Amino acid sequence: MYTIGYLLLFSAGAASLATAMPSQTRFNGQQVVSLSATGSDKVSTGVWNQVAGLDLDVWKNAADHLHIRVDAVERKALGLLPGMQVKTIVDDIQRLVDAKAYAPNTPSSQKSDWFSEYRQLEDIYNWLYQMARDHADIVSEPISIGETIEGRQILQLRVTAPGDASKRKRIWMQSLIHAREWISGSTLQYVFNSLVSGYNKGEQRIKNLLEKVVFNREYSVNGTVYGVDLNRNWPDHWALKSSSKNPKYAIFHGPAAASSREVQALMAAYIKEPNVVGAIDLHAYSQLILYPYGWTNATSPDDAAYKRMGQQIADNIYKQSGKTYTSQRISDMYLASGCVSDWWYGPAVEAEIKAGIPGPRPYAFGIELRPAETEKQGFIVGPEEIRPTGEEIYSALVHFSEEAEANSLPSGLISPDS
C-alpha cells in the first residue's frame, strides 16, 4: 500500500491588508455592482468588450452576470450600456472595509492567536520556518521553488509522518494565486497548523493519514494584482475561453502559455512529485467546489468520480459549519481556459509519464471560499472569518485526502480533446 503525505504550497498573495492595500488607498463612495444582460441568460462577448472599454475592476465573472467595482461616474456609464441591468452588491466598499477592523498597524508578532488577523508576508514566512524548527519530525524546512514577478520567494514545505516517505501518496495544496483573495492564504495556514497540531496531540485519524500521505504546500505565488492572471496562464487549451490578450483585463492570459514566473515554478515543482492523488487550489469567493473541465462543456472520463468527491466535500463542510458550498464543473459556471485544475488533470499527467514519474490522474479541485455571493461582501472578508473558514475547509480536506488515498483515480493519459 502507498502511504500519503501532504505537500503544501504557500503562495504569497496579499498576506495582509497592509501588504495589499497601502494606507493611503481608500475606496470612499465606491461600490460593487452586478451587471447582467437583459433578455439573455448569458453575459455575451459583446458585454465583455463594452466593459473592457471602460477599464473597470471585475471582481467576479459568472455565466449570467459580472461583479464590478465602480465609482459614481463608472456606475453611471454602465447604466448607459444598451441592454444592461445594474444592481448594487456592496453599497460602500470603504465603509465595509472600515467595519471589518483589520487593524493593520498592530505588529503581528504581538498577537497570541495567529488566526486573529491577516498577517504580513514576512511574519508568515517566519512562522513557517519556526513551525519547521519546532516540529522537524513531521514538517520539512521550507524551500524556495522560484520567485514571483516581484522577487518574492515561492515556498514549498511538506507535512508527513516520520519514516520513508518515498512511496507515500501526495496531496498538493496551494493558495493566493490571486492576491486579493486573502482568506485563501489564511485558510491554508489553518489547514497546515491543524495537521501538525492533530498529529502532535495523538489524534489517531491524523496520525493514520500522515503515515499514508505527504502534504505538499506552496506559498507566495502572487504578491500583487500586477501582471498575468495566473489561473489563465497554464498550458492547457490556453487563450481560448474566458481569458483575454488585453493586459488591462483581470483575466489577462499573458503573452504565451506558462509565460509567468509563478506558473513556471509551480509546474516544475509539481511534476517532480510522484503519486499526486489530489490537488487543491484555494480561492475566494462564492462557496463553490469546482472540478474539470473548464475549457469545454464536455465531461471528463472521471466525471462521475469527480461529482461524487465534490459532493462529499460540500457535505462535509455543511456538517462542520452549516455553510452551503455548491459542487460543479468549472464550465457550469463559465468556460475558462488555461486553468490549473485542467492542467493538473491533463498535461501534468502526460509530463510526469514522460519524466518517468509514476502516479494516477489526480482529483483536481478549485475551491472558492467564503463568502457566498448572497452575503454581499465580495473579497472583503474580515479576520473573524479566518478561523471558521479554516475549520470547515480543514474538516473537508481531511476527508478528501482519506478518500483520494484510498480510492485514487486510474493512471494513464486521457485525450486532451475528450
Image (spheres, grey):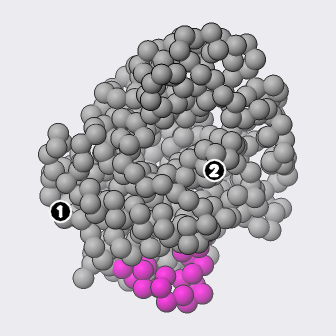
* Pointer 2 local density, CA inside 10 Å: few below 14, some 14–19, many at least 20: many
Q: For the point 68% across and 64% down, which residue is it?
A: 387
Q: Is residue 12 magenta?
A: no
Pick the quarter of the image with the C terminus. top left
Q: For the point 36% across and 79% down, which residue is it?
A: 212
Give the x, y percent position of residue 59: 59, 33
Q: Secondary structure at mark 2?
A: loop
Give the x, y percent position of residue 2: 27, 78
Q: For the point 30% across and 31% down, which residue is it?
A: 238
Near-viewer residue (412 or 293): 293
* Mark 1 or mark 2: whose residue is earlier in sequence: 2
Instruction: Tell me the magenta residue range.
Output: 188-213
Near-viewer residue (214 or 35): 35
For label 1, the residue is 411
Gap between marks 1 and 2 measured at Cα? 36 Å
Give the x, y percent position of residue 157: 48, 63
Q: Is residue 94 above or below residue 111?
A: above
Question: Residue 209, labelled with which disc?
Answer: none
For label 2, the residue is 371
* Pointer 1 local density, CA inside 10 Å: few below 14, some 14–19, many at least 20: some
Magenta span: predominant SS is helix
Total tally of numbered discs in the picture: 2
